[in-house]
Every structure is written in C-alpha cells, then in structure tokens.
C-alpha cells in the first residue's frame, strides 16, 4: 500500500497526482498547509509540528482537517528538519494527531514511517475542496513613496512582482530539502520568516545564509510571537529572532518588532532610490 505514498518538502508543490494519496510533507502543520492538503484532496498527511508556537499554530491544521475526514498527524520539529520530507519520513517521531488519525491507531511517539504505513491503509475520504483563502496583504508604509511591502501566508506566493520589495511570510525559515535556490522565489529586497522554534539542526534558520549569498536581507521572527502560516499575524505581533549579515548591515537586530523591521528595510529601499 505504500505505493500511495508521496514525499514532498512542501505541500505548496502538490499537484493532481496527490489526489487520493498519502503525503509525507516537510511543511508546518498549520492552517494554510492543511488548506493546501485538503485542496489537493489527499487521503492523509504527515507534517512537521514547527515547535507549535503561538496559539499552537504549528499543529492547527490537524483540527482543520478532522471535519473533512482527513487523517493527519504532525511529527516533532526536534526529530526531523522542517522543510525536508525525506528527513521526516526517515527519523520523524509523531507528536500530535487528529481524531481521524487516532482512529487508525496513530499516536504520539510512533515513528513517522509507521504512521505513514497506517495512513496508507485508510480509505479515501469523500469531501469537497475547501474554499480559497485570502493569503496576501499589502503593508502600509506611511511617508514612503517608492518602497513596497506585503505580508503573505506562504513563501510560495512570491512572484516576480515582488522583486525589490520587503516581504513578510508566514512560512518557516527552513530551506526545502536543504536546497539554497528554494530560499525565496523572487529577487526581493528583504524577506522575513517564522523560525519554527529553530528545531533540530537549526533547520528553522537555514534560509538566512542562503539569502545572504544572494544579497537579500533576511530575518526570522519567533514562532512564539506570531502564528506560523499567517503573514498578517507576523506583522501584528512578531518579534525578530535572528538576522543575516545583509540585514544586520542595514541596522536590523534581533529583539525588535517585525513591523519596525519592515519600516527600517523599506527606508533602506527609499535611500537606494535617492542615491
């Protein structure tokens, strides 16, 4: 039955082939990841708990999937690297389950691979695809004329239109499968990510040096100060936890608010335009 299994580093990359299949994904287990899984009509899903964080957002997707009849579980961010599906399958340990998964005998402490085996034996749930959700929001920058900034629930929502702007994402700060090219999908001026509580191997911060290599200022904010998968939450309450060298050279430091970080970075864009 494991021929039903698909391993991905991010559920943002699910396509038609995911319908009726069991997904082992490196994504966080928040609402946005659950929405994408349900939209792809998966039969079951295993994700990373992202350290839970504010309002237990790292596992909030489990309850979101229960009414749809989709069994789902999260593995501890201290057992497998966030953003790495094969690492989750290889050494992930289940930390939280929804009711549908518990009915299949999946429980905390179980190896991810055993949970995947049990999910593969589950029937495909009958369900309607969920409604789309608003997932991008402009950030107001009073007094600044050229700089642009926005918040988005997922790094996957970046487009070439975001080139040269400041982007606050709800995504975790981990590279997908350790690949530097996955750090940002656009040539943004700066990007901020949820640190997913760091996790094993410091996975929640690995985008920062990768973006440094591209000359992009980058920072993470603490998972305990903003809900993962929620860009608006990051802007409202996020506190910066780490910065890369490029961001530090612009004056950004850990401990300040995400909102102030956006203003500082946007002002740097304005200075570049005036130079």
Image (cartoon, rainbow, N blue to C red):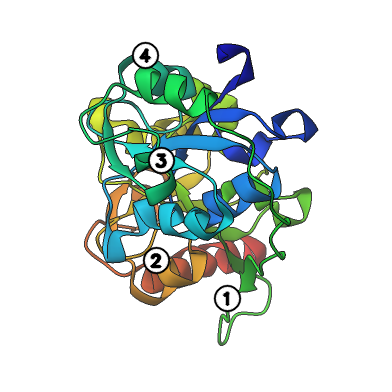
Q: CA distance from mark 1 to mark 4?
A: 40 Å
First in sequence: mark 3 or mark 1?
3
Q: Residues within 10 Å of mark 1 (few under 14, many from 20)?
A: some
- Please tell me which residue lies in front, 141 or 194: 194
Vertical position of residue 159 compared to residue 23: above or below: below
First in sequence: mark 1 or mark 2?
1
First in sequence: mark 3 or mark 4?
4
Q: Which residue is located at x 46 percent, y 67 percent?
A: 262
- Write down the residue under mark 4: 90
Per the image, label 1 sits on a secondary structure element best described as loop
Q: Nearer the viewer, mark 1 or mark 4?
A: 4
Q: Quadrant of residue 261?
A: bottom left
Q: Which residue is located at x 47 percent, y 47 percent?
A: 217
Q: CA distance from mark 3 to mark 2?
A: 40 Å
Res. 101 mark = 3
Q: Which residue is located at x 34 percent, y 41 percent?
A: 102
Q: Nearer the viewer, mark 3 or mark 4?
A: 3
- Write down the residue under mark 2: 261
First in sequence: mark 2 or mark 4?
4
198 displayed left or right of 155: left
The image position of residue 3, as x and y in percent, is 62, 12
- Write down the residue under mark 1: 139
First in sequence: mark 1 or mark 4?
4
- Please tell me which residue lies in front, 109 or 222: 109
Give the quarter of the figure containing the N terminus: top right
The image position of residue 155, as x and y in percent, is 58, 48
């Amino acid at each position: 039955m494991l021929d039903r299994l698909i391993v991905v580093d991010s559920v943002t990359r699910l396509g038609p082939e995911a319908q009726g299949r069991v997904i082992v994904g490196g994504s966080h287990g928040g609402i946005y990841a659950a929405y994408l899984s349900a939209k792809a009509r998966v039969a079951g899903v295993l994700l990373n708990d992202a350290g839970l964080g504010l309002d237990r957002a790292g596992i909030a997707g489990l309850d979101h999937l229960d009414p749809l009849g989709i069994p789902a579980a999260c593995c501890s961010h201290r057992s497998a690297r966030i953003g790495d599906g094969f690492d989750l399958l290889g050494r992930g340990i289940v930390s939280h389950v929804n009711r549908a998964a518990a009915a299949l005998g999946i429980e905390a402490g179980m190896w991810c691979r055993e949970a995947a085996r049990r999910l593969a034996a589950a029937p495909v749930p009958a369900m309607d695809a969920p409604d789309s959700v608003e997932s991008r929001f402009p950030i107001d920058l009073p007094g600044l004329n050229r700089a642009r900034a926005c918040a988005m629930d997922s790094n996957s929502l970046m487009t070439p239109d975001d080139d040269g702007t400041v982007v606050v994402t709800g995504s975790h700060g981990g590279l997908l499968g350790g690949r530097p090219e996955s750090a940002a999908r656009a040539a943004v001026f700066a990007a901020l990510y949820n640190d997913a509580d760091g996790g094993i191997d410091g996975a929640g911060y690995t985008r920062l040096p990768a973006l440094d290599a591209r000359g992009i200022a980058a920072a993470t904010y603490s998972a305990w100060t903003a809900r993962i998968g929620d860009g608006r939450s990051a802007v409202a309450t996020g506190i910066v936890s780490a910065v890369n060298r490029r961001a530090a050279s612009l004056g950004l430091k850990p401990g300040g608010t995400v909102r102030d970080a956006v203003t500082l970075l946007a002002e740097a864009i304005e200075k570049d335009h005036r130079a």
